[in-house]
Amino acid sequence: MEKVIELIKQKNMFPQGATIGVACSGGSDSMTLLHFLNANKEKLDIEIVAIHVDHGTRENDARDAYFVADYCKEHHIRFQKFKVEASVVARHKGCGIEQACREARYGVFDGLRKRGFVDRIALAHHQSDQAETVLQHILRGSGLAGASGMQYVRDDFYVRPFLDTTKQEIMSYIYENQIPYVEDETNQDTTLTRNFLRQKILPELRQVWPKVDETLCNFGKICKEDDDTIRSLMNFDAVLITPKIIKIPLTYFEYSKSYVSRLILDLFAKLGVTQGIEKKHIDSICEFAKNSENGAKISMPSNVTVHKEYEYITMALKKPKLEVTTKWEFKKGVTHFEDYGSIKIKSTKSKEILPNTLLIDADKVPENAVWRLRQEGDFIEKFGGGGIVKVKKYLSDKKVPQRLRKVLPMLAVGHEVLIIANIDIADSLKVTPETKRAYLIEFNLKNWV
């Protein structure tokens, strides 16, 4: 296992004096990694802490947690346990339980990173895991990125010291060091894709090609080199990115398919979607961009909706629906609109209108005006003249995307709309030389572009 030390140093996996969280399920691979890093922590100049995540999906979850905790106590290793509800994640994101467990687990790890609890998370994936990943991605129709398999170091946080280590080498290390571990009975469930490859397909391939694991891993490395070369030539600076909304100029879909495919995969990752995206999804987005009408939309895995909005293709995480009847009081200070952001109202003597603000005459706001969402029959008096127009047509003329038209907060009295958040005010609220009190309204509609 000395080559593991060499790989750690070659890939600069561990900064000097770093605290390494070892993802430890209690299975043979993660217990080997925990033992190995604990035995070599002085040589590597690191501190380690075992991180166990209970996914809440198996009867033996509690048993495994206690097993890891007891081992760590006996060997004086720091231990942290976290419990998640993967079934809730699966329902919320509309994905399978296998993917939900992964997303919940990585959610825990990302949280530890944000809190500064650990400097790296060490994962126990080994050579056979890599071979399974490469083969699985190929069978799903992946391009070079997927066929590259798992990375030694991802996001400068996740590291895989065993990625060049064989399963046989791990089992030999377990035997030599008498390392205890528990068996996860779900590993035998061949209805899960990875288990099917592990239990059925790869054993058959090894009968004909004994080095198939190594061959698949080497193929993945070649794909990674080629993919990195192509990515180094890409430049997509005009893409607008927020944590929940991404806008891609339609002109980008005229680029080479190999460029566009990589862009879309990268942007899914920025939305937190790293699993379940296949060639068919990328192809459908490209076709949608070229041939769909403005305002059209299609659904993607993990609660992502793709919209065609004038000169852009927008990828958006689905938001919870607000009730149309919900109302908010018009008042100075900050009003929060659940997941949609906030509006801040303050007095001002300046007549300057700043970005994401509107200026109104405070004395012209009716006492019974309330913030609410758009309703059928709403109308607004155009600012600066132009008469009264239906809000539906007004938003269309302003090229407000369809996905926003039903969720933009509006100040209204009955069906008369006085303010449309971040868009405009009615002529009746405009500031004039006779204005005595003015309000500056600041809009923070988070994740909206």
Image (cartoon, helix red, strand yellow):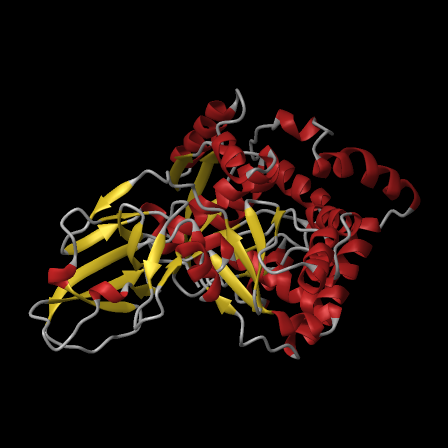
- In the displayed orientation, state which residue is furthest to the left: 436
Q: Which residue is drawn at the image coordinates 56% and 66% (left, top)?
A: 310
| Residue drawn 36% across the image and 48% down it | 339
Q: Position of residue 268 (x, y in %)?
A: 58, 57
| Nearest the eye: 166 or 110 | 110
Quarter of the picture containing the C terminus is bottom left
- Residue 360 occupies quadrant: bottom left
Give the vertical position of 10 relative to 175 (above or below): below
Residue 377 picture location, percent across and down: 39, 47
Q: Position of residue 369 (x, y in %)?
A: 20, 49
Q: Tell me the residue at 62%/48% (across/down).
A: 300
135 w.r.t. 65: above or below: below
Q: Is residue 52 above or below residue 272?
A: above
Q: Residue furthest top?
A: 59
Please say whether residue 6 is visible from this viewpoint. yes
Query: Who's the residue at 32% across and 54% down the image?
Result: 341
Between 19 and 351, the one nearer to me in the picture: 351
- Using the image as rendered, state which of residue 6 and residue 362 is in the foreground: 362
